[in-house]
Amino acid sequence: MSALTHDVADFPGECELLDAFLALETPPGFKAELIEGKIVVTPPPDGEHETAIGRIAFQVAGNSPKGTVDFAPTKGLIVPAGRYIPDGTFTKRGAFSGADSWWRPEGVLMVLEVTSSRLRKDREEKRTGYAAAGIPLYLLVDRKADQVILHSEPEDGEYLSIVPVKIGDPLDLPAPSPSRSTPATSSETDTRPASRDVPTHSVNLCKTASVSSLSLIISSRRAGPQ
């Protein structure tokens, strides 16, 4: 199934669009996001998509210093371009403790996306959205291209460093570096209290994370839509 999209033109203004989005009720298993002025509703993913997420989360956790990193699946993030729900979010320990369903990305070390039917969403729209939010690392598993792509060094809405590897090859995850620019958040999405204590010390996210275990679950998908 492909994602359903409602364009911003369906609504009279940004405030109305955000209100409509926040009031939206989705069926169980579906997720709704507000991406660059569009409400995008995505159906439940296939099993290989979820297996890829689980294996990456396991590898990152196993190679990170004990007690320093949390993993949050499908956590809502407030970013300048809207409201995004990554397939997975790695944070400093306790960064989302007490957080509401939608939260700014303070303490986020890396976000993870695995492609489904709407490739442009993950390859372009979410890439620039995460960079604009100052998220240090964006890891994309592009099943259609048979690649895992690490984006880092966010600056002015783009990632300066992009490292692609073939699925099945090892990939080193560096210690996340802070954004070189301050992300601007629109007043429509800036809805939570500004003050909150989040540790600012550097965390070495992962020593070396091999994605070789993904090759077995991706190979059978190359012939079909992803």
Image (cartoon, rainbow, N blue to C red):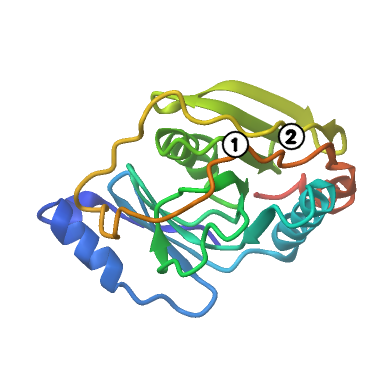
Q: Locate residue 99 relative to residue 34 in the image: left or right.
A: right
Image mark count? 2
Q: Dot 1 lies on which element?
A: strand
Residue type marked 1: Leu
Position above or below: 57 against 208: below
Task: Indicate the position of residue 186 as horizontal and vertical percent values.
Answer: 23, 44
**In the rendered image, which residue does mark 2 sit on?**
173
**In the rendered image, which residue does mark 1 sit on?**
137
Q: Locate residue 194 relative to residue 212 in the image: left or right.
A: left
Task: Indicate the position of residue 45 as horizontal and vertical percent values.
Answer: 62, 64
Residue at left offset 23%, top offset 59%: 18
Quarter of the image that includes the N terminus: bottom right
- The 10 Å Cα crowd at callout 2, few under 14, some 14 to 19, many 20 or more, is some
Residue type marked 2: Leu
Residue at left offset 62%, top offset 34%: 176
Residue at left offset 23%, top offset 66%: 20
Residue nearest the observer in this picture, 224 or 110: 110
Q: Evaluate if marks 2 and 1 touch, with contact meaning CB atoms under 8 Å apart.
A: yes
Task: Indicate the position of residue 94 as horizontal and vertical percent values.
Answer: 58, 61
Task: Indicate the position of residue 70 as horizontal and vertical percent values.
Answer: 65, 58
Give the Cα separation between the discs numbered 2 and 1: 9 Å
Residue nearest the observer in this picture, 187 or 67: 67
Q: On the image, which quarter does residue 169 sit in?
A: top right
- The 10 Å Cα crowd at callout 1, few under 14, some 14 to 19, many 20 or more, is many
Q: On the image, which quarter does residue 100 sit in?
A: bottom left
Residue at left offset 47%, top offset 58%: 3
Q: Locate residue 95 relative to residue 51 in the image: left or right.
A: left
